Image: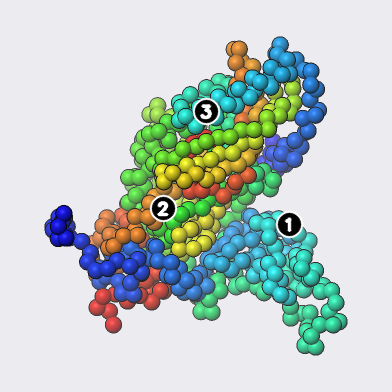
Amino acid sequence: MSSSSLLSSQSAAFSKDKPSAMVPDDFIWQGYSALETQWRVERLLSRYVACIDDDNLEAWPSFFTQEACRYEIITRENVERGLPLTLVFCTSQGMLADRIVSLREANIYPQRWYRHIVSNVLIQAVAEDYLEVHSHYVVLQTRRNGQTSIFSAGKYKDRIVFQNGELKFAEKRVVVDTHSIDTLLVSPI
Amino acid sequence: MTSQYIGNPAIGSPTGNYTGKAPAVWPAKVNQIPKEVFGDKSLFEDELKNIFYGDCWHVVGHFAEIPNAGDFKTFDLGRVPLLIARGKDNQVRVFYNTCTHRGNQLEVATSGNRKEFECPYHRWLFSLDGALAACPGSKEFAPDFKQENFGLMEVKSAQFMGIIFVTMGKNTPPLTEWLGDVVPPTLSTLLGGDGRLKLLGYQKVRYDSNWKGYNDNDGYHAPMLHTAFRLLNWQGGTTGFQRMTKNGHVVFEAELKAIQNNGFVNDPSLVEFKGSDPAKGSRIVQLFPATVMVKHLDIINLRFAMARSHDVTEVHYAYFAHEDDDEAMVQHRIRQSSNLLGPCGMISMEDAAIFQRIHIGNQTPGFAEFQKGVTSLSEVPMDVKQNDETGNLPRWEHYRKVMGFKREGEK
């Protein structure tokens, strides 16, 4: 793949969000009804953000598939310009774990609390062995002085698979509207 | 508690009423910087006049950000909005981002591609080279109106290997003179030898810090602050150096040996070195007043800084590949650029925290005290070692002179 085709495919991926009406109301996925699938997806997202907000980051990589997972945070500005650079880009569980080791043992930063709010969870596509799920997120940040501000707003674009009886992220793409970062980005989103 | 001062008399304390106002006279000792220069709000107005709108060159972009005819980016120099555009003739020009009619901001997007620039207010239309192409109703304009006199106002600009410099000063020396002999060789290596770069994208950040605090990183701090270098057992070579110019630029060169994986990282592919020559592993160029450019491993990173106010500095970290890279190299650069440096980087995100702490902590009486590498209290050092912090003193000295501050005892 040439870099230009990489650029255009990323750009197209954003503009081609299909309306979820394309997904029928009565699908069956991995033996679950549409309703139960929706519930399991929302529970996965809730557990995922609770893991981050409760500072239980050592467990964070386990939300992803062991083989060939992909996690990236990219600004909407870069996506819409067709630019591939991200803010965080991990292509293995090992890289995810390295991020956490780094912020625990190496990095110096002021302690802040994150509070994720996730909503608008839409199953965009149902394939035999994966789901494409989009949702909106907001991260509220509370600094040490007790003041809370909006740190980041954006969209999760997830590819979710069913593995050993559990839902896992095979791919999690965080597309960030807030491309002006307040000082630094430490924890995952 | 009595009203008497309680403390350690051996240490002492600055006396007098602390006002937070930057002093007009600096100490005779060249390693002492008055802390007030970081937090004094009114000082920023003088800095705009003397530095940002004065006889200095300022980095506002790179050709690779606007590779095609009609591409443009906007940027602010202090509070002055700029429009940087590539014309049909492939020339890059820098304009004031304002319609020549009533001063309406011409382009609001941070970047894009246009066939021409149109002011929506009265539909004045400018071609990419700045000429006024159309202005509705001009038959009824003032008797002395001439269309050819109302092209976009151009800002004086120059380039080095695609880096776009501007100046609003009347007496700014030519760019080659301003860069001097020290900067070009290091900057050339940093830019892949020829500056033929390909834009990968941006990380943009706002620091709650004065621009001088952002730009005061030194050779002493790197192995101290950035624990990741130690944890990764990542040693620089012994052939490195730090050089300065009298007008405030600093360059660093260091060899970068391939990392010896000590089992600390689960996935060492991230810190692989694919560049051809480890002797060219690490390069840093800091240009007065506020520009930092870095090559580390296979990362090429130009940091376009905007001094927004005395306490906010906005920095656009732009990352690049080289035009000759194959696809595997591009992907490698994207991975490294996305994870290691900058405001989200595993190795150096500490810098961001320090910029803010430097800003807050210096709103106290006394001086920022430079120590590592100081050999004379009266002479600004021009010969320093790689891990000395004294490399910043020529920049502070240049700043002092440009701002017109005297030293104690100076006439």
Looking at the picture, how far across and down is residue B190, in whole percent?
50, 53
Pointer 3 and pointer 2 on the same chain: no
Q: Amino acid at mark 3?
A: Ala
Chain letter for mark 2, please.
B
Q: Is residue B379 visible?
A: no
Numbered disc in front, either 3 or 2: 3
Distance between mark 2 and mark 1 Cα atoms = 35 Å
* Label 1 secondary element: strand
Reply above or below: B67 against B171.
above
Pointer 2 and pointer 1 on the same chain: yes
Estimate how packed mark 2 is, as few (under 14), some (14 to 19) or many (20 or more) residues with alpha carbons within 10 Å.
many
Chain letter for mark 3, please.
A
Question: Residue at 77% across / 30% down in the picture?
Answer: A20
Q: Amino acid at mark 2?
A: Phe
Numbered disc in front, either 2 or 1: 2
Reply above or below: B400 against B6.
below
Looking at the picture, how far across and down is residue A31, in whole percent?
71, 11
Marks 2,1: beta carbons within 8 A: no
* Label 2 secondary element: helix
Chain letter for mark 1, please.
B
Q: Amino acid at mark 1?
A: Asn
* Label 3 secondary element: helix
- What residue is pinned by disc 1? B113
